[in-house]
Amino acid sequence: MKTDSLFYRMFQTAPGLLFELMERSPTEASDYEFRSVELKQTAFRIDGVLLPIHQSANRPVYFIEVQFQKDPQLYHRVFAEIFLYLAQNPNTYDWEAVLIYPSHSVEPDESNLYAVLLDSPKVRRIYLDELDAQHDLSLGLEITKLVIEPEETAPDRAKRLIARAQQEEVAEMTREEIIELVETIIVYKFSHLSRKEIEAMLGLGELKQTRVYQEALAEGREEGREEGREEGVLEAIAEILETRFGEGARELVQELTRDTEIAVLKEWLRQAIAINSLEEFEQILKGVQNLTSKVDRK
């Protein structure tokens, strides 16, 4: 797993971590969802985008870039992707870019072309090695910092984090999810070790056998399966519409709520196969939304 993928997984699980890195309240994350975004008619794909859940909300879109290797083309690519996204989504309320580095040394040497942006409130650069300057780091920030911890000290720090997880909470994450995330980071750092060896290193064997842990894990898996089914049907709808009608189909599906019951999603899937145009599918969705609004008013 690449470092950027590891961070994106962390932010997808707990977007509040990103707000903590920006020295903001993690509760702000409740209005957002973490996604990757394809830019139409280009080879660009932005892997880290934090989008407001409600498009009508006056909240900024956050573009996240995690960079652990020096890349002289970084700023050219990042700002090209951002401004192309804004050109294709002109109704965006506002935007900010968050660039995450392990240290200053990884930044591109030449940045004069983008100095106005880099020095503006639109762009926030975060250096993980400087988090130590902050006293009393939250559990979430300590977990984030574990990514750059040297191998010699990483296991001990991970054990301390697991112990803290028994007493503290991270916004949006259960204790079991925190432990799993810490374990995933250690697996990433010690890729030559097996999962069982990692569990032994961190002393997780006995903890994972406790009844409380097993019951919480089973509950989380059931919720995850339900969410996974919904995501799978939405992706199938997007693939069918995109194959049949091309441009605009995926953007339409992205507007569908992930809170919709699975039976309704399956009906939309059948409609996606049967309809004759993208406009027809859009009318079906509007009809469902209108009906839902009437029921809610009653």
Image: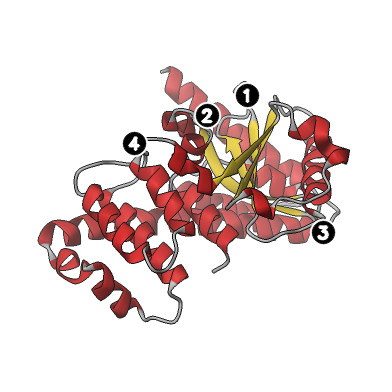
Gap between marks 4 and 2 measured at Cα: 51 Å
Name the residue: 83% across, 45% down. 80
Q: Residue 291 carries which label?
A: 2
Mark 1 in CB contact with mark 3 (< 8 angstroms):
no
> Residue at 47% across / 58% down in the picture?
147
Q: In this view, does 132 lie above or below 229?
A: above
- Residue 283 in percent (x, y) is at 68, 37
Q: Between disc 4 and disc 2, whose residue precedes?
A: 4
Q: Mark 1 points at which residue?
A: 56
Quarter containing the N terminus: bottom right
Query: Pointers 3 and 4 in contact (CB under 8 A)?
Result: no
Label 1: few (<14), some (14–19) or many (≥20) C-alpha neighbours in 10 Å:
few
Q: Mark 4 vs mark 2: give the one in front.
A: 4
User: What residue did someone put label 3 on?
Assistant: 43
SS class, disc 2? helix
Could you give the CA–CA distance between mark 3 and mark 4, rounded to whole angstroms?
43 Å
Q: How crowded is mark 3: few (under 14 residues within 10 Å), some or many (20 or more)?
A: few
Q: How far apart are marks 3 and 2 (CA)?
A: 39 Å
Q: Is residue 241 placed above or below 125 in the rendered structure?
A: below
Give the mark nearer the N terminus: 3 vs 4. Answer: 3
- Left or right of 116? Residue 48 is left
Q: In this view, does 32 lie to the left or right of 119?
A: left
Q: What residue type is labelled 1?
A: Ser
